[in-house]
Amino acid sequence: MLLSFLRGPKSERNKLSGFANDCRGVTAVEVALLMLLLVPMLVVVVDLFQLEGEKRRLHQLSRAMASNIVANFDSPTFELGQQELVYNYFKDRSSSPETRIVVEACFCDQQEQGPGGFCDADQVPTQIISVRNRGRVIGTWLSDREIDVGLKVKRVGSRGC
């Protein structure tokens, strides 16, 4: 009936007004068949949006941690600042990501320096610091997903490694 309305002449448009009073149940079957396709698609789209939102939040956390590293890495309150950043982005402690901050390399005027070494007074010290956040998103229909976000910070002018 509905398909014949779309194909038929203008006089058949009045059949649309009888849509609610359709006694044969064809319309109900059509709606039920469409719902079998549309509801799962809607749930998958919601899961994908949730995954992208969590990725974005982890990227923002990583950038905020990188800014804190550049500003306060040698400060005694650095660790407290990092914990406060994680709390600001993830209020629920059970969903907070696993965070790792590693000093990967130290350089004095482009020459690699070992850990614990200090640069001479006339050399420019540089540190390469890696920030890595790993989180988990629990999906309704899609399986649980791991999110891994990492970036490297080049910190120039630090005291030593």
Image (cartoon, rainbow, N blue to C red):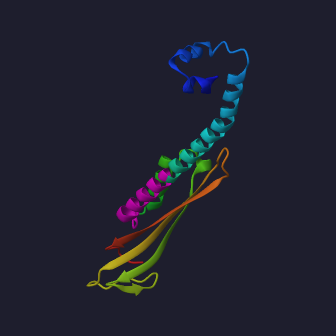
Q: Position of residue 87 (x, y in %)?
A: 51, 49
**Can the viewer see residue 24 in this picture?**
yes
Is residue 69 magenta-colored? Answer: yes
Q: Tell me what residue is drawn at x 43 percent, y 61 percent.
A: 78
Q: Nearer the viewer, residue 35 or 93?
A: 35
Q: Is residue 117 above or below residue 6?
A: below
Q: Position of residue 138 (x, y in %)?
A: 64, 48
Q: How many numbered circles does the render carry?
A: 0
Is residue 96 magenta-colored? Answer: no
Q: Nearer the viewer, residue 20 or 101?
A: 20
Residue 118 figure quarter: bottom left
Horizontal side of 3 relative to 85 (left or right) equals right
- Give the quarter of the figure containing the C terminus: bottom left
Residue 155 figure quarter: bottom left
Q: Tell me what residue is drawn at x 42 percent, y 58 percent.
A: 63
What residue occupies the far left of the structure in this picture? 122
Q: Is residue 125 above or below residue 88?
A: below
Horizontal side of 156 relative to 57 (left or right) equals left
What residue occupies the far front of the structure in this picture? 9
Q: Position of residue 69 (x, y in %)?
A: 40, 64
Q: Tell me what residue is drawn at x 40 percent, y 86 percent.
A: 112
Horizontal side of 109 relative to 131 (left or right) equals left
**Can the viewer see residue 77 in this picture?**
no
Q: Position of residue 107 (x, y in %)?
A: 37, 82
Q: Nearer the viewer, residue 148 or 97?
A: 148
- Give the quarter of the figure containing the N terminus: top right
Horizontal side of 15 relative to 80 (left or right) equals right
Q: Nearer the viewer, residue 133 or 159?
A: 133
**Is most of the magenta stretch helix, strand or loop?**
helix
Which residues fall within the magenta stretch?
56-75
Residue 24 figure quarter: top right
Q: Tell me what residue is drawn at x 47 percent, y 76 percent.
A: 104
